[in-house]
Amino acid sequence: MTTQCRVDVKAGTITCPAGQVESFEPGQVVQFDPEVCGACALRAQCTHAASGRGRSVRLGEDEGL
Ligand code: SF4
């Protein structure tokens, strides 16, 4: 399974491989919910975030290009 997130620039949302959805603004760092990430079976392949933290993803200012 891929650990890439899906970005919907039009909707301004990013969806992680397990289906967790966060909204974002271009140039922002998105933090996924640490509680959801902590219990996620994909965590080991998905993120190196410290215990108690969720995956973070930086979106480019030009993400829509
Ligand atoms: S660790 Fe977090 S970001 Fe990664 S797949 Fe699981 S819920 Fe999604």
Image: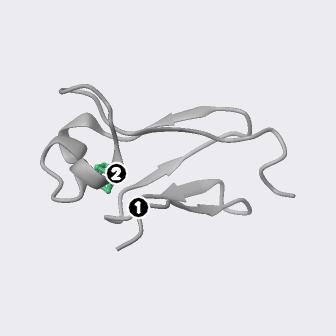
Q: Is residue 62 left or right of residue 60?
A: right
> Residue type at mark 2?
Cys
Q: Which residue is mark 2?
A: 46
Kind of residue sitting beneath label 1: Thr
- Looking at this view, name the residue that lies furthest to the bottom: 1
Residue 15: image x %, image y %?
Answer: 47, 60
* Marks 2 & 1, CB-CB < 8 Å contact: yes
Counting residues from the start of the chain, the first of labels 2 and 1 encountered is: 1
Q: Which mark is residue 3?
A: 1
Q: Quadrant of residue 18?
A: bottom left
Mark 2 closeness class: few <14, some 14–19, many ≥20 residues within 10 Å: some
Disc 2 CB within 8 Å of nearest ligand 1 atom: yes
Q: Does 57 sit above or below residue 45? A: above
Residue at figure coordinates x 58%, y 56% from the top left: 13
The N terminus - image quarter: bottom left
Residue at image point 72% right, 33% down: 27
Q: Position of residue 51 (x, y in %)?
A: 18, 27
For ligand 1, tell me if the residue under mark 1 lies within 8 Å. yes
Rendering coords of residue 48 (x, y %): 32, 36
Q: Is residue 15 left or right of residue 58?
A: left
